[in-house]
Image (cartoon, rainbow, N blue to C red):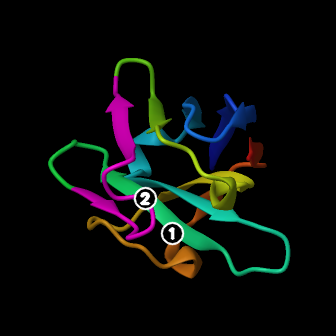
Amino acid sequence: QVQLVESGGGLVQAGGSLRLSCAASGRIFSIFTVAWFRQAPGKEREFIAAIHWSGVSESYGDSVKGRFTISRDNAKNTVSLQMNSLKPEDTAVYYCAAATRRIVITTPSLYDYWGQGTQVTVSS
C-alpha cells in the first residue's frame, strides 16, 4: 500500500500563487507516476499534471499549461505543484494520485492510490 497526504491548500486572491505538496509513504518503490487532479462541485475530476518518479517525463492539462509546474523530491518522497496566476476557475479540491504503471497517464481510473484532497479557493 501507498499513502498520500496533500498539504498547502487555502484561500488566495486571483493572480496569486499557492504551492501544494504530496507526501508519499509505504511501498513507494512501486510508484512510477504521481499526478495532481482537481474536482470542482458538480464537475468531473480533471487532470492537472503528472510526473514520472524519475523526473524524465511530465504532462500538463491544457487549462494549466504555463501557470502550474509539477516537481518531485525523491529524497523527501514528495511531489509538489506550484500554482501561479491563479484564477477563480481554479477553485476545486486538489487530489494527489499515484500509479504503478510505468508511463505518465492522465486518466483518473488508471491511478491506484489517492490522497484525501486539499481545498483551493481563488477569490475574484
Which residue shows up at 66% across the image and 42% down it? 3
Residue, far left:
56
Q: Horizontally, is 14 left or right of 99 in the view?
A: right
Find disc 2 in the rendering and name its residue. Answer: 64
Which residue shows up at 32% across the image and 51% down it? 51
> In the image shown, does 14 or 29 lie closer to the viewer?
14
Estimate the x, y position of residue 52 in percent, counting from the top left.
28, 52
The boundaries of the magenta stretch are: 58-74
> In the image shown, does 86 or 51 lie closer to the viewer?
86
Q: Is residue 73 magenta?
A: yes
Circle 2: element type: loop
Circle 1: element type: strand
- Say what amino acid the circle numbered 2 marks: Val
Which residue shows up at 19% across the image and 54% down it? 57
Find disc 1 in the rendering and name its residue. Answer: 47
**Callout 2 environment at 10 Å: few (<14), some (14 to 19), or many (20+)?**
some
Classify 99 as above or below 118.
below
- Say what amino acid the circle numbered 1 marks: Phe
Q: Is residue 64 magenta?
A: yes
Estimate the x, y position of residue 81 in percent, counting from the top left.
47, 39
